[in-house]
Image: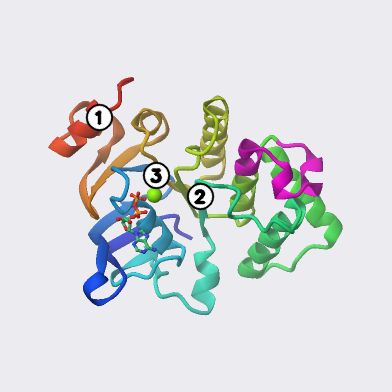
Amino acid sequence: MSNQLTFESLSITYGHGASAFTAVDGVDLTLRAGEVLGLVGESGSGKSTIARAAVGLAEPSGGRILLGDTEISHARGAVLRERRRVQMIFQDPQSCFNPRRSIGQSLDEALIAAHRREGTSTPQLRARKDEIANLLRAVALPAETALRMPAQLSGGQRQRVAVARAIAAKPAVILADEITSALDVSVQGSVLNLLKELQRELGFSMLFISHNLAVVRIVCDRVAVMRSGALVEVGDTVDVMTAPTHDYTRELIAAVPSL
Ligand SMILES: Nc1ncnc2c1ncn2[C@@H]1O[C@H](COP(=O)(O)OP(=O)(O)O)[C@@H](O)[C@H]1O
Ligand SMILES: [Mg+2]
């Protein structure tokens, strides 16, 4: 099964008629199997919209999205399950957990969904509890975290749980959308290191959306630059950072003092 995600001539329009706004305008972009691809660009350039479309949270008005050879845009039935191999992690880890479910229950749901998709029989509760403990260990959280409610965790802990839940889905692709922007600077690094380690170990592909070019330079193999719904340039991170071909990219890089 392929871990490649392809956006083909993707366009996404919000609203209708006179209030219609095209947030993504004919984007061709391939997230190669096993790579970390950075997606950068100023606020409002359409980065989140692209990611949301890949998990069905935004509807393409044109073009299509493929996981391997399977079209996952306009998904129905079995393809909906297949699309769960694409997992998104959001900026705000608070809003994406059911506040009335324990962390263990949320992880359990993700595990059960993954078993259903893979066609493997769902293990007994005790075995699932072991799996949940393993997931929590993988994100460096104690097993007791399973008993906690989302509101009882810090932002950094919740984001680790969000990573664990994404991993529980046995993902081919992870879309990480500004995942450390809401965290204290002191914990940003550890969450990023964790994700990068898991990516190396498990081999999923990752679209890493960030406005922080200093972080992108460390985390990403390649980088794509977006402006006003269109791609401006795509290339190896080192090349784009050291020899950008587009003025807009030069402006973005110049705006980061540490570079
Ligand atoms: N649900 C929505 N309805 C209408 N416009 C939206 C919606 N979501 C985003 N937009 C608009 O689409 C554009 C791209 O947004 P977004 O993809 O969130 O950009 P980015 O993630 O790069 O900051 C912005 O102009 C934003 O205001
Ligand atoms: Mg965004």
Q: Which residue is mark 3?
A: 209
142 in magenta: yes
Q: State the residue at coordinates (53%, 76%).
A: 78
Q: Where is residue 128 drawn, in percent x and y?
A: 79, 56
Query: What is the three-letter code of the residue carrying label 2?
Result: Phe
Q: State the residue at coordinates (57%, 39%).
A: 198
Q: State the residue at coordinates (59%, 46%).
A: 163
Where residue 256 sits, quadrant-wise, is top left
**Which residues are the magenta region?**
141-160
Secondary structure found at label 3: strand
Q: CA distance from mark 3 to mark 1?
A: 16 Å
- Report the disc number at residue 90: 2
Q: Are marks 2 and 1 in contact (CB under 8 Å)?
A: no
Q: Residues within 10 Å of mark 2 (few under 14, many from 20)?
A: many
Query: What is the three-letter code of the residue carrying label 3?
Result: Ile
Quadrant of picture, ligand 1: bottom left
Q: Are marks 3 and 2 in contact (CB under 8 Å)?
A: no
Check the image and name the residue furthest to the front.
Answer: 18
Q: Which residue is mark 1?
A: 253
Quick check: 158 left or right of 104? Answer: left
Check the image and name the residue furthest to the top.
Answer: 258
Q: CA distance from mark 3 to mark 2?
A: 10 Å
Q: Is mark 3 within 8 Å of ligand 2?
A: yes
Q: Are marks 3 and 1 in contact (CB under 8 Å)?
A: no
Which secondary structure type mostly characterizes the magenta part of the structure? helix
- Nearest to N terminus: mark 2 or mark 1: 2
